[in-house]
Every structure is written in structure tokens, then in C-alpha cells.
Image (cartoon, helix red, strand yellow):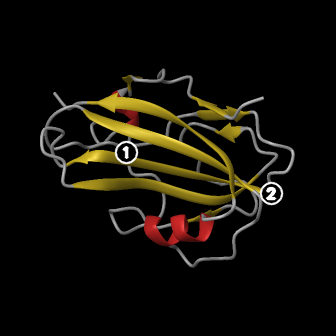
Amino acid sequence: MRLIITSTAFSHQGAIPAQYTCDGSDISPPLAWSGIPDSAKSLVLIIDDPDAPDPAAPQRTWVHWLLYNLPAASTGLAEGIMTLPTGTLEGINDRQRTGYSGPCPPIGRHRYFHKLYALDAVLPNLDRPSKAVLEKAMQGHILTQTELVGLYQRH
């Protein structure tokens, strides 16, 4: 089996509905995954946008949500989840807070990468890490990874 991440709210390369953005309720979309390797000890979810601020001239990758130490036995996250699975820890997004921060592109149609990693370890408590700190801690522990890309443009 291969690792797969999906959402009932949007398809791969499909439009993210406004309710999951700053133009709506800004709640996290429902996510589901399967194909977790038997040897996996934890999962990491990183949602980011490499098109910030303008897809025609991207300058940085904007981080929307960082979750790590998701249980390897978990199968997804419910829409607008408020209580994370036991053991799950959060990193700091680019709004300088934990939690989900939905798409809010200033210009153009942006791509939002929902990246899921299966790790061979449970990471130590990194005390609300940045994406860079989390990615460094993941090095050498990634068994497999996958992604779901959603698109959003404000009107």
C-alpha cells in the first residue's frame, strides 16, 4: 500500500471551498489518510503555500498548519477539529500561532500543499517549532510521504 491523503471537501488540484479560508469560517478541512506503513511510529502534517505573496512572483512559502506526533494509527482529522488526537503536538504557523490558518491569498490563485509524512520515530517535544525546526527533526526518520494540493483564489 502507498500513503494517500484525501479530503471530502476538495479533490487533488481542486478548489478549496471558501468555508476553509479567511473568506469563510476559516476552519480546517476534513482530511483522511491511509496506507500508513506498519513500521510508522508517528505522522506529521504540514500545510503550506509556496506561492506567497503572488504566484507570478513567489517570494516565500507561507505555513498554515504544523502538526507532529500524530498517532500512526490515526486515519485523519475531522472538519474544524478542536481537540487533536492524543499525543499530537503543534508548531507555529506564519501567523505566529498554533492551529489552522486557512488560505487568504492577497493576489492570484495559490496552491496549498497538505503534506503528510510517516516517520519511524515519535519526535521529542520541540516546543511549538517553526517549519524549519520540525523539518530538521524529521530528517532521517521519513519512511514515506504524500501530498494533497488544493487551490484557492479570492474574488
Q: Earlier in the sequence, mark 1 or mark 2?
A: 2
Q: Nearer the viewer, residue 80 or 41?
A: 41
Q: Tag on residue 102?
A: 1
Which residue is painted at 49% across and 41% down in the image?
114
- Say few, some or many: other residues with alpha carbon within 10 Å of mark 1 (under 14 / 14 to 19 / 20 or more): many
Using the numbered discs, state the Cα–Cα distance from disc 1 to disc 2 in whole angstroms.
28 Å
Check the image and report above or below for 63 versus 4.
below
Q: Is residue 130 visible?
A: no
The amino acid at mark 1 is Gly
Q: Residue furthest right?
A: 38
Expressed as whole percent of the image width and height from the top left, the position of residue 59 reads 18, 54
Q: Quadrant of residue 88?
A: bottom right
Where 63 falls versus 109 (above or below)? below
What secondary structure is found at the residue carrying circle 1? loop
**Mark 2 burial class by Cα count in 10 Å: few <14, some 14-19, many 20+:** many
Q: Position of residue 152 (x, y in %)?
A: 29, 31
Taking the image as drawn, is residue 64 in sight? yes
Please give the residue where the numbered disc 2 appears in the rendered image. Answer: 41
User: What residue is shown at x 49% (from left), y 72% (from top)?
Assistant: 133
Image point (76%, 44%), residue name: 74
The residue at the point 39 percent across, 49 percent down is: 48
Mark 1 or 2, closer to the camera: 2
Foreground of the two, 12 or 28: 12
Can you tell which mark lies on residue 155? Answer: none
Picture quadrant where residue 14 is located: top left
Quarter placement of the N terminus? top right
Q: Seen in the image, is 123 located left or right of residue 50?
A: right
Q: Amino acid at mark 2?
A: Lys
- Residue 144 location in percent, x, y? 67, 45
Give the vertical position of 22 relative to 151 (above or below): below
Q: Are marks 1 and 2 in contact (CB under 8 Å)?
A: no
Q: How many marks?
A: 2
